[in-house]
Image (tube, helix red, strand yellow):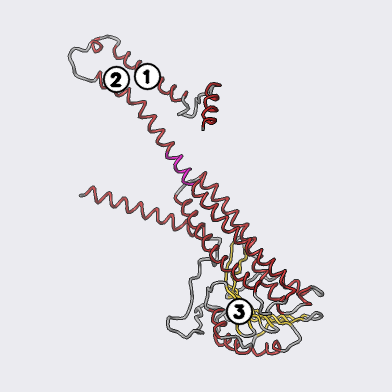
């Protein structure tokens, strides 16, 4: 009973240690992802009104940035009060309002009331994460996407919601930071197509920046997969196994969200409700190709991660085989030696060799000769790795004949 308790105690300690290793390795593998798995679904309580908002307690207050432009003019400024955005409702200009932070529900409601945003659309921008989708509300469209960017070799993924109106675009993100710097540069450059076009081109430019923002992420994931492959070959430890599993889970999550994003982009490129002009159709089809390319690359990486798992299992199996080979060689050496010692250790009275003057030396000589012969034979067979047997021409011919017969 006492031995059973000790065994259970030792097994429990081993399981705890391995669990901690896997947990630490999972956190290490997830370390370069800031938001892919960090935030769970945040929504209103069951039975709440459909347009209810669930805002995190530590959410930052909304920060409003306003870009207003025409083919000849551009104005950028920060806005403190929602009422200051009322001129954006006037025709003649294209307006882009950027909202960062969801910490003030009253201000968000005021913004929705000013631009007549549907309450369900406004709730979907706050209750995250939502699946990537395109919803139409009268003369407005809600576009929900996943936005990815690399910050100090870390991948930050968060939800982006875009509401497209008759002459304005409002983008919503929960945390500061986006991938729209190239769009801002084009807006600040006079004579560019985005300055000469309407609100539909601005919405397309924002979506295009979001989709293209995943290409650097793909490159970083590919580099990480190469590191995992090297670790699977050189260090097939439980920590490496946990990192591979965590990486595969991340890729499964990314593939799932990217499929939804691809479907949303396809819906945009093929809808005929007049939200996007006919001149933008080729651009939307190109955007669809980019989204499909990103998804295909994610799925390729996921399939390659399965190969890394196979490499890890092969490495572990090879190490196990090496250990078993070493133990087998040692046992094979001692089997004949044990036999010799056992024979001359029997307590029979009439054993001629026991009375021989050189019997002791002879037994030692036989044992040394047998051990040396076995070691030499093992080496000649290539089982020790030091003295490998060189294949003869006849062996090569036999191997070639076997391949031809197969």
Q: Is residue 236 left or right of residue 81?
A: left
| Residue 383 point in image, percent of width and height | 45, 29
Q: Please tell me whether mark 3 sits on a helix, a strand or a loop.
A: strand
Q: CA distance from mark 1 to mark 3?
A: 84 Å
The residue beneath circle 1 is 370
Residue occupying image coordinates x 32% and y 51%: 11
Q: Residues within 10 Å of mark 1 (few under 14, many from 20)?
A: some
Most extreme residue toward the front is 405
User: Residues in magenta?
Assistant: 311-320
Image depth: mark 2 or mark 3 in front = 3
Image depth: mark 1 or mark 3 in front = 3
Instruction: Give the number of the disc on residue 139.
Output: none
* Of callouts 2 and 3, the N-terminal one: 3
Q: Is residue 9 magenta?
A: no
Q: Please tell me whether mark 1 sits on a helix, a strand or a loop.
A: helix
Query: Label 3 near label 1: C-beta < 8 Å?
Result: no
Query: Label 2 near label 1: C-beta < 8 Å?
Result: yes
The residue beneath circle 2 is 340
Residue occupying image coordinates x 46% and y 29%: 384
| Residue 155 point in image, percent of width and height | 59, 63
Residue 317, placed above or below residue 160: above
The residue beneath circle 3 is 142
In front here: 170 or 276? 276
Q: CA distance from mark 2 to mark 3?
A: 87 Å
Residue occupying image coordinates x 29% and y 22%: 339
Q: Is residue 78 left or right of residue 188?
A: left
Q: Please tell me whether mark 2 sits on a helix, a strand or a loop.
A: helix
């Amino acid at each position: 009973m006492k031995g059973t308790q000790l065994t259970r105690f030792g097994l429990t300690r081993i399981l705890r240690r391995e669990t901690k290793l896997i947990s630490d390795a999972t956190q290490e593998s997830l370390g370069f992802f800031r938001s892919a798995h960090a935030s769970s679904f945040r929504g209103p309580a069951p039975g709440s009104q459909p347009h209810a908002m669930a805002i995190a307690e530590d959410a930052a207050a909304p920060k409003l940035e306003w870009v207003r432009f025409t083919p000849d003019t551009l104005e950028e400024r920060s806005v403190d009060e929602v009422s200051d955005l009322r001129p954006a409702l006037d025709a003649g200009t294209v307006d882009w309002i950027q909202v960062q932070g969801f910490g003030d529900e009253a201000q968000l409601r005021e913004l929705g009331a000013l631009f007549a945003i549907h309450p369900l659309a406004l709730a979907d921008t706050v209750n995250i994460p939502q699946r990537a989708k395109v919803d139409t509300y009268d003369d407005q469209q809600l576009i929900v996407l996943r936005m990815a960017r690399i910050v100090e070799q870390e991948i930050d993924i968060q939800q982006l919601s875009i509401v497209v109106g008759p002459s304005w675009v409002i983008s919503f993100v929960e945390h500061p930071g986006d991938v729209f710097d190239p769009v801002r540069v084009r807006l600040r450059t006079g004579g560019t197509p985005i300055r000469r076009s309407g609100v539909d081109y601005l919405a397309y430019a924002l979506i295009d920046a979001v989709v293209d923002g995943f290409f650097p992420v793909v490159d970083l994931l590919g580099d990480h997969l190469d590191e995992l492959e090297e670790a699977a070959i050189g260090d097939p430890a439980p920590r490496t196994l946990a990192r591979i599993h965590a990486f595969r889970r991340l890729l499964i999550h990314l593939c799932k969200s990217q499929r939804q994003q691809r479907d949303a982009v396809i819906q945009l490129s093929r809808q005929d409700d007049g939200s996007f002009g006919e001149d933008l159709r080729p651009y939307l089809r190109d955007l669809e190709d980019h989204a499909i390319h990103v998804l295909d690359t994610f799925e390729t990486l996921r399939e390659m991660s399965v190969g890394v798992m196979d490499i890890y299992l092969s490495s572990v199996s090879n190490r196990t085989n090496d250990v078993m080979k070493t133990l087998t060689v040692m046992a094979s050496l001692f089997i004949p030696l044990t036999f010799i010692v056992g024979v001359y250790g029997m307590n029979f009275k009439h054993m001629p060799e026991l009375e021989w003057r050189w019997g002791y030396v002879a037994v030692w000589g036989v044992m040394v000769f047998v051990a040396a012969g076995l070691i030499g034979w093992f080496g000649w067979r290539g089982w020790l790795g030091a003295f490998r047997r060189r294949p003869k021409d006849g062996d090569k011919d036999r191997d070639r004949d076997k391949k031809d017969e197969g």
